[in-house]
């Protein structure tokens, strides 16, 4: 195992990402795990540099100093000449360090360790600390870099294309209104098949850092290939690189204003029509890597112009917090304010829309006037305001309308009833739709949890189909899913620190904590009034966290010990009434198998602050796939006579079960309503 310093000197990126060996198959699988990192406070960072004799200046998101790795502190002449270009940026929230010339990234603890060692060595040898090498050295990464370079070399600029291929290519991406000169200015290329756009990302160095490969894929398999229904899909290669920004090579040192867009075509549209510098984010609205922040330090004003859907709007608000609200302006998500390329295609004036950019108010008191546009936005996008819809649980959408940021969900159910299994699929469903997810599993090991989720993801029993493992694991790795490396009892502060860190670094939108009892290590026997106070304190902290970070927190809590035949109610949640009071949603996994002959398990929504709808969602456990969602209906193929007879008989059985279940549902609903009233 390499020491921290060795890893730093190899220049590996490892903050917040570790290699996690899953024992599910004889292969190394990389899952994202969030290390237990406690970020240093700003005053700690400042004090360290002061004590080390380094002069720092304060930016919007980072502290800046002359890079102690790249500039020899003893060589006065070198320091004067090169200190301006050889800067080290230290993130003020996480302490993440990034050298702009060598592109080495490091965590705060590694920087402090290595500088302390370097200082001791310098005293002896009177020489500068060793220049750390660039980027990760692992083989997988090297081969990805090679592939990316090859693809780039083989690509051709758009001006080299014949006019009919050029027109076809632009039409595929709905970019007919963009000129070829603009594509060339942004150094865009296309692959040999003329189907993919290669869009380079740049940092301060002249070489491009990585390429965003944008291609179209069919949304509906029955549609012709060039249909407008095709959707644009973007992949960044190499995957694990220090990201840059599309368009950064056009930025001049004197530029103080910039327009940030969610995709490359939007940035080109802004630049073409308005003539102002525009940059596209490397991962769109999915997340804003902290490695990009130093590149944006020079701008005093940043206009965030994403799409006019609610998810883009949520992303804009959360990115602005990361970029420093003071300098951020927004294009509000109204129908009249589509993304730049769409606006251009619709013949709208981009200049007029840009004039509507307003600063995000961050005072404690606001007037309705300031909120007016936002209220209009919410009203005109009511469906999107309701949140991300589950694909596997249509009934959850009916009752809860969707999964929204900033809420607290409390989930309970009898011991061993399948709470973890359900939560795994419930969160996986959202994660598969791009919701950045963080799992804190205090009860079961991450390997076991990952195995459950991978099985649910693949919808097949991988133990029996081990040959399919690689295919599914490769896809699973691409999900925006992270695991906390905790197991067993933890202090609230450590957990909240890890959550805050990952919200900042990975733009986490959904945190799952499973479960509270294991996190605080409270057994029922130990329960006393003080223990209730501890629980209340935890719930209050998660509530505050969800609101302040606009992040959904789902907490699994065991129920109090009750008679097995009794149905659980809100009052059955372990602890005081605080949990159900503070929660926006309360879900109960009811297990009626003990009481009814054909009783089943189901999820009961007993509290829903968003619109008050309550109800139940039947669960169908599939032991092979570990899923609880209703089986997906296959596309109907004309059944044979024999099959039809069999189907009718089956329907009859299902129908019986459903009738019985319906009766049970009605009963449980009225019981719950009474429960809540109490
Ligand atoms: N609906 C179900 N029917 C039968 N078995 C199930 C069902 N759901 C989950 N299981 C199985 O029951 C076992 C326990 O599931 P799980 O760990 O999800 O329960 P839990 O409620 O989280 O447990 P605990 O109370 O210990 O936290 C697992 O082996 C799981 O595969």
Image (cartoon, rainbow, N blue to C red):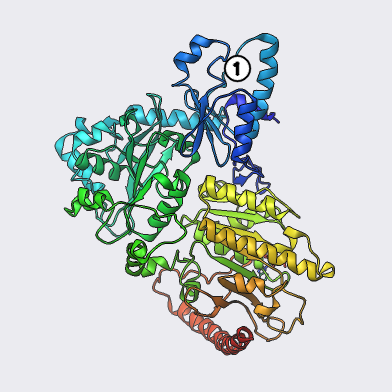
Residue under the image location 55 percent in, 25 percent down: 55
Location of residue 55 with respect to 323 vertically, above or below:
above
The quadrant of the image that shows the N terminus is: top right
**Residue at horizontal 59 percent and vertical 63 percent from the top:** 543
As displayed, is residue 325 above or below residue 375? above
Q: Which quarter of the picture shows residue 377?
A: bottom left
Q: In this picture, is 468 found above or below 566?
A: above
Residue lying furthest left in this view? 163
Residue 509 seen: yes
**Residue at mark 1:** 130
Instruction: Tell me: 543 left or right of 535.
Output: left
- Residue shown at 42% from the left, 35% from the top: 297
Say above or below: 116 vs 327: above
Crowding near the residue tagged with mark 1, few <14, some 14–19, many ≥20 C-alpha atoms within 10 Å: few
User: x, y percentage for residue 380?
Assistant: 32, 68
Say whether residue 598 is left or right of residue 644.
right
Q: Secondary structure at mark 1?
A: loop
Give 260 or 360, whichever is nearer the viewer.
360
Residue 26 in which image quadrant: top right
Can you tell me which quadrant of the image ligand 1 is in? bottom right
Instruction: Give coordinates of residue 342: x percent, y percent.
Output: 24, 52
In the picture, the quarter occupied by the C terminus is: bottom right
Front one among 151 and 407: 407
């Amino acid at each position: 195992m390499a020491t921290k310093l060795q890893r730093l000197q190899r220049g590996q990126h490892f903050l917040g990402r570790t290699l996690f060996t899953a024992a599910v198959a004889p292969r190394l699988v990389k899952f994202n795990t969030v290390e237990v990192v406690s970020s240093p406070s700003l005053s700690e960072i400042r004090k360290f540099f002061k004590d080390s004799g380094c002069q720092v200046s304060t930016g919007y998101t980072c502290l800046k100093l002359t890079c102690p790795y790249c500039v020899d502190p003893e060589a006065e002449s070198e320091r004067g000449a090169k200190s301006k270009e050889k800067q080290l940026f230290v993130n003020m929230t996480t302490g993440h360090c990034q050298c702009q010339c060598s592109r080495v990234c490091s965590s705060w603890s590694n920087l402090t360790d290595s500088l302390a060692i370097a200082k001791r060595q310098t005293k002896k040898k009177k020489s500068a600390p060793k220049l750390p090498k660039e980027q990760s050295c692992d083989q997988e990464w090297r081969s990805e870099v090679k592939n990316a370079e090859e693809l780039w070399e083989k690509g051709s600029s758009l001006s080299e294309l014949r006019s009919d291929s050029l027109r076809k290519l632009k039409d595929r991406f709905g970019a007919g209104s963009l000129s070829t000169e603009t594509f060339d200015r942004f150094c865009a290329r296309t692959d040999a098949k003329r189907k993919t756009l290669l869009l380079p990302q740049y940092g301060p160095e002249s070489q491009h850092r990585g390429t965003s490969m944008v291609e179209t894929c069919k949304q509906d398999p029955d549609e012709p290939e060039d249909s407008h229904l095709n959707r644009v899909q973007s992949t960044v290669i190499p995957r694990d690189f220090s990201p840059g920004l599309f368009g950064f090579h056009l930025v001049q040192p004197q530029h103080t204003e910039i327009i940030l867009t969610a995709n490359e075509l939007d940035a080109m549209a802004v630049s073409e029509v308005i003539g102002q510098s525009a940059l596209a984010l490397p991962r769109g609205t999915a997340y804003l890597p902290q490695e990009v922040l130093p590149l944006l330090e020079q701008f005093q004003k940043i206009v965030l112009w994403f799409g006019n859907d609610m998810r883009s709007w949520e992303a804009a608000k959360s990115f602005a917090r990361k970029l420093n609200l003071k300098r951020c302006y927004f294009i509000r998500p109204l129908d009249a304010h589509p993304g730049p390329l769409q606006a251009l295609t619709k013949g709208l004036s981009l200049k007029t829309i840009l004039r509507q950019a307003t600063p995000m108010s961050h005072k404690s008191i606001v007037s309705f006037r300031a909120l007016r546009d936002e209220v209009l936005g919410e009203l005109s996008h009511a469906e999107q305001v309701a949140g991300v819809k589950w694909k596997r649980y249509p009934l959850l959408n009916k009752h809860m309308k969707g999964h929204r940021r900033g809420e607290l969900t409390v989930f309970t159910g009898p011991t061993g009833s399948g709470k973890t299994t359900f939560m795994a699929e419930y969160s996986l469903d959202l994660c598969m739709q791009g919701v950045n997810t963080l799992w804190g599993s205090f009860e079961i090991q991450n390997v076991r949890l990952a195995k459950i989720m991978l099985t649910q993801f693949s919808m097949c029993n991988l133990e029996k189909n081990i040959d399919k493992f690689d295919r599914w694991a490769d896809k699973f790795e691409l999900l925006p899913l992270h695991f906390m490396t905790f197991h067993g009892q933890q202090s609230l502060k450590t957990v909240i620190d890890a959550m805050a860190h990952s919200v900042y670094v990975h733009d986490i939108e959904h945190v799952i904590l499973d479960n509270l009892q294991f996190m605080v290590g409270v057994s029922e026997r130990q329960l006393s009034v003080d223990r209730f106070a501890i629980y209340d304190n935890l719930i209050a902290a998660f509530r505050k966290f969800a609101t302040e970070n606009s992040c959904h927190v789902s907490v699994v809590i065991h129920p109090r010990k009750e008679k097995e035949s009794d149905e659980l109610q809100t009052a059955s949640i372990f602890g005081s009434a605080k949990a159900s009071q503070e929660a926006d949603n309360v879900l109960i996994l009811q297990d009626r198998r003990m009481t009814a002959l054909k009783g089943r398990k189901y999820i009961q929504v007993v509290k829903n602050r968003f619109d008050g709808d309550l109800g139940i969602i039947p669960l169908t456990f599939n032991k092979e796939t570990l899923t609880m969602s209703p089986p997906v209906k296959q596309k109907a193929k004309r059944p044979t006579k024999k099959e039809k007879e069999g189907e009718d008989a089956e329907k009859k059985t299902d129908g019986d079960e459903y009738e019985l279940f319906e009766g049970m549902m009605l009963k449980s609903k009225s019981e719950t309503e009474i429960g809540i009233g109490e």
